[in-house]
Amino acid sequence: MHKNRIPKSRSFNPDRMHVQLVHESEHVKVMNFNLKAGQEMPVHSHNLDGELVMVVLSGEGQLLGKNGALDSIAAGDVIICEIRVPHGVKAKKDMSLVVTIAPPI
């Protein structure tokens, strides 16, 4: 069993999304993504089987798909999708996410 903590004072980079590795093993990868308002994680997908879980810790923005914005997202939302499905996010307000990928890439 492991216990990791995402810092309460999350790091934000004014020039690009900040990514912090929280945990990685042969079975799962957990990362903290921090986006300033206006920044985005570009829409992308991975050619493999697995699932992606995004938990919005704070802030708000848009969930992005192949053809643009899919839905609004905010603190407390949990997004689950196959890793093959095109996905991305754009922050409307400073946003912090925990992203879990299984199996890890």
Image: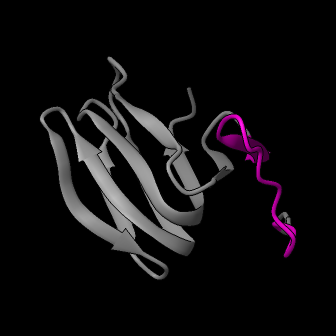
Where 78 falls versus 81 (above or below)?
below
Report the span colored magenta: 6-24
Relative placement, left or right, of 82 versus 52 is left
Q: Looking at the picture, how far across and down is residue 102, in whole percent?
A: 50, 42
Residue 81 percent location from the top left of the image: 28, 50
Q: Quadrant of residue 29?
A: top right
Residue 45: quarter of image: top left
The residue positioned 85% from the left and 65% from the top of the image is 4
What secondary structure prevails in the magenta region?
Answer: loop
Please report the residue visible at 58 percent of the width from the left and 61 percent of the height from the top: 97
Residue drawn at (31%, 39%), measured in percent from left and top? 87
Residue at the image position 12 percent from the left and 35 percent from the top: 67
Q: Is residue 98 left or right of residue 56?
A: right
100 relative to 72 in the view: left or right = right
- In the picture, the quarter occupied by the C terminus is top right
Q: In the rendered view, tell whether residue 92 sits above or below residue 16.
A: below
Residue 8 sits inside the magenta stretch: yes
